[in-house]
Image (cartoon, grey):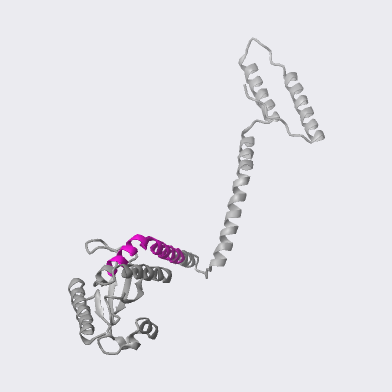
């Protein structure tokens, strides 16, 4: 490569950097300090093979999926698009390393790099970094929901753990004793068992209450005898015979003897 060709490549690369600085805000475009880069990143950008200071330059474009006028998502994503120029760029693709600044998995980083490599091959011969930054942005917009879903699951899990800890703390304060997850679960199990037992016995209690309201055979006969006495006293035309009451007493005694002998309960008799 002649000196003129080399200078032309450098001029093309410098012009593109100036254009990128004009397009992106300061926080979105950075000229990196090569000495502070991780060794692996520097090797992938082939900075250790640089023959001069110009070739040793590296840059970062921060890519976010949302447009400037859009509200950022609850769990944002930020991609660091690091690049360096080979000596004969743009006649060859740039050297690219993708890093997650926020919310992007390693798998997605690898997929983005593959996607950008294909885009770069399609744009060889022209300045392409702005095109590649837009390609990365479009990829994030199409696939962001996958990684956000994983982060939302993690956030939901942490929220549930915090809620459980708060619940145990409230129980501890209310009881005035040390409450752990294990002791609380033990208490809750016993509480549910006692409540289930009380619910199962509830029909028996109701039945006993209903039975108490019923009139036994003895009560029935005594009530009838009282009514008969009252009727006899009020009826002047008819004589009252106390022998009839004695007969009823004998019948009542026989009934009670039968109950004791047979071991059965006296049926409830309806009132007239």
Answer above or below: position of 56 versus 121: below
For the stretch drawn in magenta, the main secondary structure is helix
Screen quadrant of the N terminus = bottom left
Q: Position of residue 259 (x, y in %)?
A: 78, 33
* Quadrant position of the C terminus in the picture: top right
**Residue extending farthest front:** 2
Q: Is residue 243 magenta?
A: no
Residue 26 is drawn in which quadrant?
bottom left
Task: Give the residue at the far right of this rendering.
Answer: 261
Residue at the (22%, 82%) spot, across then down: 5
Q: Position of residue 73 (x, y in %)?
A: 31, 62
Q: Which of these two is toward me, 271 or 254?
A: 271
Q: Nearer the viewer, residue 240 or 256?
A: 256
Q: Nearer the viewer, residue 210 or 140?
A: 140
Q: Does 23 sit above or below residue 86?
A: above
Question: Residue at the location (57% across, 67% down)?
Answer: 182
Residue 66 rendering spot, x and y as whole percentages: 28, 63
- Please give the count of numbered marks on the rendered protein: 0
Q: Quadrant of residue 21?
A: bottom left
Residue 214 left/right relative to 120 = right
Farthest residue toward the top? 237
Residue for point 76% across, 21% down = 247
Q: Horizontally, is 72 left or right of 40 in the view? A: left
Question: Whole-percent x and y of residue 75?
Answer: 34, 65
Taking the image as shown, residue 95 lies to the left or right of residue 15, namely right
Question: Between residues 210 and 106, which one lies in front from this camera angle?
Answer: 106
Part of the protein shown in magenta: 132-161
């Amino acid at each position: 490569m002649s000196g003129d060709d080399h200078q032309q490549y450098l001029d093309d690369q410098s012009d593109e950097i100036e254009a990128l600085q004009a397009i992106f805000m300061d926080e979105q475009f950075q000229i990196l300090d090569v000495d502070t880069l991780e060794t692996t990143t520097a090797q992938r950008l082939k900075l250790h093979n640089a023959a001069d200071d110009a070739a040793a330059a590296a840059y970062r474009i921060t890519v976010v999926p949302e447009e400037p006028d859009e509200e950022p998502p609850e769990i944002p994503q930020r991609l660091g698009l690091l690049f360096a120029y080979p000596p004969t760029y743009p006649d060859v693709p740039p050297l690219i390393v993708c890093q997650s600044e926020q919310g992007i998995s390693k798998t997605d980083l690898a997929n983005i790099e593959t996607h950008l490599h294909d885009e770069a091959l399609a744009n060889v011969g022209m300045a392409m970094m702005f095109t590649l930054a837009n390609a990365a942005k479009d990829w994030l917009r199409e696939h962001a929901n996958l990684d956000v879903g994983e982060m939302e699951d993690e956030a939901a899990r942490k929220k549930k753990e915090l809620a459980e800890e708060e619940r145990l703390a409230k129980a501890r304060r209310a009881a005035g004793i040390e409450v752990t997850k294990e002791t609380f679960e033990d208490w809750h199990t016993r509480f549910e068992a006692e409540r289930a037992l009380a619910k199962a016995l509830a029909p028996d209690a109701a039945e006993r209450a209903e039975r108490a309201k019923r009139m036994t055979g003895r009560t029935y006969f005594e009530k009838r005898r009282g009514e008969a006495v009252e009727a006899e006293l009020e009826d002047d035309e008819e004589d009252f015979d106390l022998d009839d009451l004695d007969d009823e007493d004998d019948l009542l005694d026989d009934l009670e003897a039968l109950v004791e002998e047979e071991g059965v309960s006296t049926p409830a008799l309806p009132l007239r």
